[in-house]
């Protein structure tokens, strides 16, 4: 009998479900079935796949209460947050179903003077079987950003959900089955890291990973050994820059929400604020006032839920400790704010930039607010991070100018999180936050490769690509190169 593991409710510790730990052979079998399904899925064409994906999104919407309560049970987040997450995930499925054909349309390229007798086209082909490894913090939104895009491009998908949210993964697979025209298009495998490792070692053609930077490096190394290309969506330490002309009420409201919602367990959550000294006292005072109204608690009782992964509690506590030891101060909360499984809001100020609390991802409802002399300093400190996922800029007049100088994958001006909900724009980071993109046309094209097809339209009297090439043909090429100043191609 296969070994199993339990999915636990992080608030009550009660067992919600039991799932198999699938290892090498079983994973290989699921991937082999996905491989068999690829040709039929490709044959369905964009229209057929669109119909299936739209039917899937309708099914999810119809059953939103069921999946939202499962998400809430497995992660501990409030039901309304879970519903919002499902809605955004569904909007991504709909967007990619409707736009895949256009984005992947064959493009015609100019062949250049030397090859004027050729037609040159570039097609986009699906890669085959895509493996997706997901985290637990947004157990439907995050994986769907890879799964739906890979499916729309004509690939079949094998998904390994986090061991903290296997139930949501199984629900996704079951829901897809209700609309799937045949088997093997979208399947899941369950288990711990070893199951993910087995997927990296299987016969997949591309892997899309979302999770910590530490695991991403292991995944990239395993895939490199098999020449499997990867998309890596990893952690962040997102900065918030607040200029002196910012709308402070809105900036505080969005920043505290960005930092504390989902118990701070958001890759694009605000972790550090750089506020202009002219408005810093007001910003901090308003942030503290707001934090006083925000409470962690069980679904239905708090503004946000518990820390889903028990081991993260130690990291959050250690960052609070480090911030204070290194010279930072509490503006709100204390070391006692960590009350497993919950962490009440913590606001730290004046934390030295070399503190672990400023450098490493905390992934908890704590925020650091540091005061800066000017926007140049804010930009410099924002960029002085090993991460480069998202950033928020608050300013009435200088938003675009500041944003253009930030070294990261996404910037929201006078807003937070919004880029994740706009299906048309790519999502992803630079540096330790990963590489490759999900969402938008770029996120769709990740699951395809460019295939060039050139065709002779008519024959020229000269054939350069032949042993029959004559000396006068060479002279003609040199002459034309000189005349066109190298613009032959
Ligand atoms: P994690 O790295 O611990 O696990 C992610 C997944 O990888 C899980 O399914 C896990 O079972 C699997 N895994 C573990 N070891 C593996 C191995 N050796 N080979 C293959 N797979 C393996 O991350 P987590 O705790 O689930 O998620 C939290 C992290 O995810 C945070 O750092 C967060 O910032 C990041 N995240 C990033 C994004 C993004 O889009 N950039 C989105 C959500 C979360």
Image (cartoon, rainbow, N blue to C red):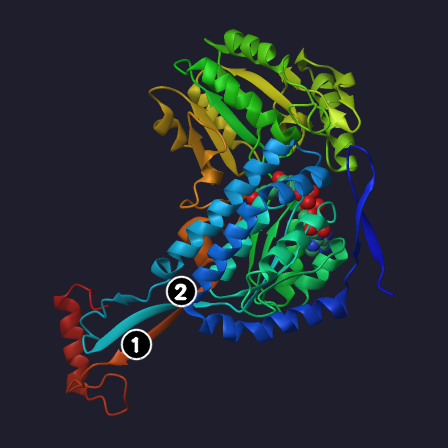
Question: Residue 74 is drawn in which quadrant?
Answer: top right
* Mark pair 2, 1: CA separation: 27 Å
Question: Residue 105 is drawn in which quadrant?
Answer: bottom left
- Horizontal and vertical percent for residue 14? 83, 39
128 versus 6 height, above or below: below
Element type where label 2 sits in the image: helix
Residue underneath mark 2: 47
Residue underneath mark 1: 454
Q: Residue furthest bottom?
A: 468
- Horizontal and vertical percent for residue 233? 57, 47
Instruction: Identify the residue shown where x is 28% and y is 91%.
Output: 467
Q: Residues within 10 Å of mark 1 (few under 14, many from 20)?
A: few
Quarter containing the N terminus: bottom right
Instruction: Identify the residue shown where x is 67% and y is 48%.
Output: 168
- Horizontal and vertical percent for residue 153? 46, 62
> Does any portion of residue 217 appear in the rendered image?
no
Instruction: Please state which of residues 442 and 45 is positioned toward the viewer in this rendering.
Output: 45
Instruction: Identify the residue shown where x is 68% and y is 66%.
Output: 201
Q: Residues within 10 Å of mark 2 (few under 14, many from 20)?
A: some
């Amino acid at each position: 009998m296969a070994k199993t593991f339990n999915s636990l409710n992080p608030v009550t510790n009660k067992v919600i479900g039991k799932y198999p730990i699938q290892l090498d052979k079983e994973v290989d079998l699921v991937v082999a079935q996905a491989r068999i399904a690829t040709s039929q899925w490709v044959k369905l064409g964009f229209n057929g796949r669109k119909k299936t994906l739209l039917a899937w999104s309708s099914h999810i919407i119809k059953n939103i209460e069921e999946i939202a309560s499962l998400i809430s049970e497995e992660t501990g987040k409030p039901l309304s947050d879970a519903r919002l997450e499902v809605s955004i995930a569904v909007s991504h499925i709909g967007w990619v179903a409707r736009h895949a054909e256009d984005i992947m349309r064959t493009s015609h390229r100019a062949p250049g003077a030397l090859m004027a007798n050729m037609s040159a086209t570039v097609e986009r082909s699906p890669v085959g079987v895509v493996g997706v490894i997901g985290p637990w913090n947004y157990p439907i939104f995050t994986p769907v950003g890879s799964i739906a895009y890979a499916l729309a491009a004509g690939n079949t998908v094998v998904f390994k959900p986090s061991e903290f949210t296997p139930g949501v993964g199984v629900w996704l697979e079951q829901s897809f089955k209700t609309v799937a025209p045949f088997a093997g298009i979208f399947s899941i495998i369950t288990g711990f890291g070893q199951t993910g490792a087995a997927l990296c070692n299987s016969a997949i053609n591309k892997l899309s990973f979302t999770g910590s930077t530490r695991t991403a490096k292991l995944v990239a190394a395993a895939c490199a050994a098999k020449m499997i290309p990867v998309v890596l969506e990893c952690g962040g330490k997102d900065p918030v820059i607040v200029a002196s002309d910012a709308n402070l009420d809105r900036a505080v409201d969005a920043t505290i929400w960005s930092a504390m919602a989902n118990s701070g367990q958001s890759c694009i959550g605000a972790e550090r604020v750089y506020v202009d000294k002219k408005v810093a006292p007001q910003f901090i005072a308003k942030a503290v006032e707001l934090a006083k109204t925000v409470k962690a608690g069980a679904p239905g009782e708090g503004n946000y839920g518990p820390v889903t992964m028990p081991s993260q509690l130690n990291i959050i506590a250690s960052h609070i400790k480090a911030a204070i030891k290194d010279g930072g101060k509490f503006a709100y909360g204390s070391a006692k704010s960590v009350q497993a499984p919950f962490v009440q809001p913590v606001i730290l100020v004046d934390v030295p930039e070399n503190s672990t609390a400023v450098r490493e991802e905390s992934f908890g409802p704590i925020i650091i607010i540091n005061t800066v002399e000017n926007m140049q300093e804010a930009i410099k400190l924002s960029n002085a991070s090993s991460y480069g996922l998202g950033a928020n800029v608050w300013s009435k007049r200088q938003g675009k100018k500041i944003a253009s100088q930030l070294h990261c994958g996404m910037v929201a001006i006078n807003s937070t999180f919004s880029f994740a909900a706009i299906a048309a724009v790519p999502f992803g980071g630079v540096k330790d936050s990963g590489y490759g993109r999900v969402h938008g046309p770029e996120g769709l094209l990740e699951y395809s490769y460019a295939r060039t097809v050139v065709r002779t339209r008519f024959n020229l009297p000269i054939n350069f690509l032949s042993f029959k090439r004559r000396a006068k043909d060479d002279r003609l090429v040199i002459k034309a190169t000189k005349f066109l100043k190298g613009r032959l191609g």
